Amino acid sequence: MNVEVIGSSGQIGSGLLRAFSTPEFQQRSKFEVPKTLIIAAGCSNSSIQSVEIETEFLRFERLLRNIPLRNFSQIVLISSGGSIYGRDFSIPIMENCPTRPTTPYGILKLRCEELVINRVSELGLKLLVLRLANVYSDKLKGIIGSIIRHHRYGNDFELRSRLESTKQYGHLEDYLCVIRDILLESHFWINPNNIVILNVYSPIKYSIQEILSMTESILGSKIEFRIENDLLLPRETIELTTLYPHLDFLIGRHNWTTMNHFISSLR
């Protein structure tokens, strides 16, 4: 197989290994995908605290230093589209919009991006940075995971955004399909500087209120949550789009999992 994955024990990395192990992908990748390294390592905890940023960054820096990047024709970095742009943006957000992350997680992800970009540029390699928006899966991370764990185990659940905050949420399996297509059609992502950033997003948007209501209706229990001061919480309506029409086509042709279907599968 022409594709290797660093970070294969994580939610996205392990999923990528599974997606790339199919006979169809292995056969096509021999002819259509240059020798590629996917870096899916780095902090996956969106609740990381500010004091942990430097430790996590140094860990990622050590990892990158020990990777033989010269052995590959193309590097793919899995990053975050849900946090890296921050809150001072226009809607919809394209890849050329400023990055002003405000959360520790977003700050760390941007620092990791910049480190990889600098290293790959020094070596003259091609780099694809995939900024994924709000991935959810049965690993139960992020806001979806908090809601489901509260339902199952009674875990404390504290809202960090207003109920009307709206984002694009996509199931992991759907993102894996789009990433596979991006690799198989890598000739579309040509840039004179060899560095291409792609916003990879679900076309389906949900507010936190909608997710709570769906969960309560499908699972049959009231979701209790803490909220200290609604007026101090951010009202986030984040919508990614892309500068690349072909990427928009790849995303649009896919049949994305709905949140209703996902929550129903957890019963």
Image (cartoon, helix red, strand yellow):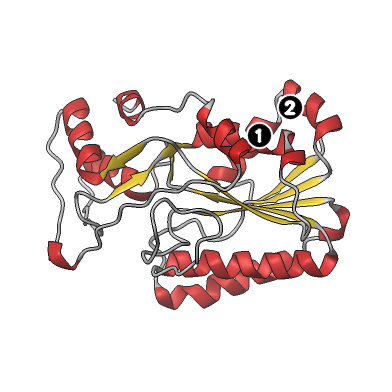
Mark 1 nearby-residue class (10 Å; few <14, some 14–19, many ≥20): some
Residue 180 image label:
1
Say what amino acid the circle numbered 2 marks.
Phe
Q: Image height check: is 91 above or below 145?
A: below
Q: Would residue 22 be visible to someone looking at this image? A: yes
Q: Image height check: is 259 above or below 65?
A: above
Instruction: Pick whichever, 266 or 111, lies toward us.
Output: 111
User: Is label 2 in a helix, a strand or a loop?
Assistant: helix
Mark 2 nearby-residue class (10 Å; few <14, some 14–19, many ≥20): some
Residue visible at 66% across and 34% down in the picture: 180
User: Is label 1 in a helix, a strand or a loop?
Assistant: helix
Residue 8, given in percent of the width and then of the height, sits at 64, 46
Q: Give the Cα distance between marks 1 and 2.
A: 8 Å
How many numbered marks have been drawn onto this rendered protein structure?
2
Marks 1 and 2, the one that precedes in the sequence: 2
Residue 233, image quadrant = bottom left
Residue 202, given in percent of the width and then of the height, sits at 45, 38
Quadrant, the N terminus: top right
Residue 121, given in percent of the width and then of the height, sits at 78, 66
Disc 2 designates what residue? 25
Residue 57, given in percent of the width and then of the height, sits at 58, 71
Residue 5 image label:
none
Left or right: where 58 falls relative to 51: right
Q: Would residue 145 be visible to someone looking at this image? A: no
Residue visible at 61% across and 74% down in the picture: 58
Residue 69, image quadrant = bottom right
Q: Image height check: is 87 above or below 1?
A: below
Q: Is label 1 in contact with label 2 (beta carbons under 8 Å)?
A: yes
